[in-house]
Amino acid sequence: MKKWNRRIAVESLLFPLVVYLVYTAYQGVSGYLMTMYYVPDIVNEYESVDYLQHKVSFGEVYRFEWGGLAGSLLAWLILSLVYYIVRYWWKFKRQL
């Protein structure tokens, strides 16, 4: 069995974290910009409020599911594994 490269392993664990942080920052900035440039339209918004007061929506209430957290962790592990394999392959290919 081949020896694990510690530097590549640490990079493969940090890379998905950086991707997540960039994605979260993008969501925050886009939400801020949407809030900043929002212009309320009182006349047309009343129609949607009137509709909500007279219609009943059926469905289920969203509750925290452990499956979502497990899916996120699985995606993080897969991204880490793919990054490790690509980096290890790239390093091995450069040494030849």
Image (cartoon, rainbow, N blue to C red):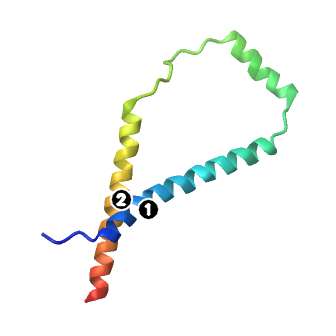
Q: How many marks?
A: 2
On-image quarter of the N terminus:
bottom left
Residue closer to the observer: 64 or 8: 8
The residue where tag 1 is placed is 15
Query: Quick check: 53 above or below 91?
Result: above
Instruction: Specify the farthest residue to the front.
Output: 6
The residue where tag 2 is placed is 80
Q: In terms of image quadrants, where is residue 5? A: bottom left
Q: Position of residue 56 (x, y in %)?
A: 61, 11
Taking the spot 81% from the left edge, 40% from the top edge, the residue there is 38
Query: Quick check: 37 above or below 3?
Result: above
Labelled pair 2, 1 in contact (Cβ < 8 Å): yes
Q: Is residue 27 left or right of residue 80?
A: right
Instruction: Check disc 1 and report its element: helix, strand or loop.
Output: helix
- What kind of residue is marked 1? Phe
Taking the spot 31% from the left edge, 86% from the top edge, the residue there is 94
User: Which of the two discs, 2 and 1, labels the residue nearer the N terminus?
Assistant: 1
Q: Position of residue 76 (x, y in %)?
A: 38, 51
Q: Is residue 54 left or right of residue 76?
A: right
Instruction: Specify the farthest residue to the left.
Output: 1
Instruction: Check disc 2 and report its element: helix, strand or loop.
Output: helix
Taking the spot 33% from the left edge, 62% from the top edge, the residue there is 82
Q: In terms of image quadrants, where is residue 96? A: bottom left
Q: Is residue 48 left or right of residue 71?
A: right
Query: Quick check: 29 above or below 45?
Result: below
Label 2 crowd bin: few (<14), some (14–19), many (20+), radius 10 Å: many
- The residues bearing labels 2 and 1 have C-alpha atoms spaced at a distance of 7 Å
Residue closer to the observer: 33 or 13: 13
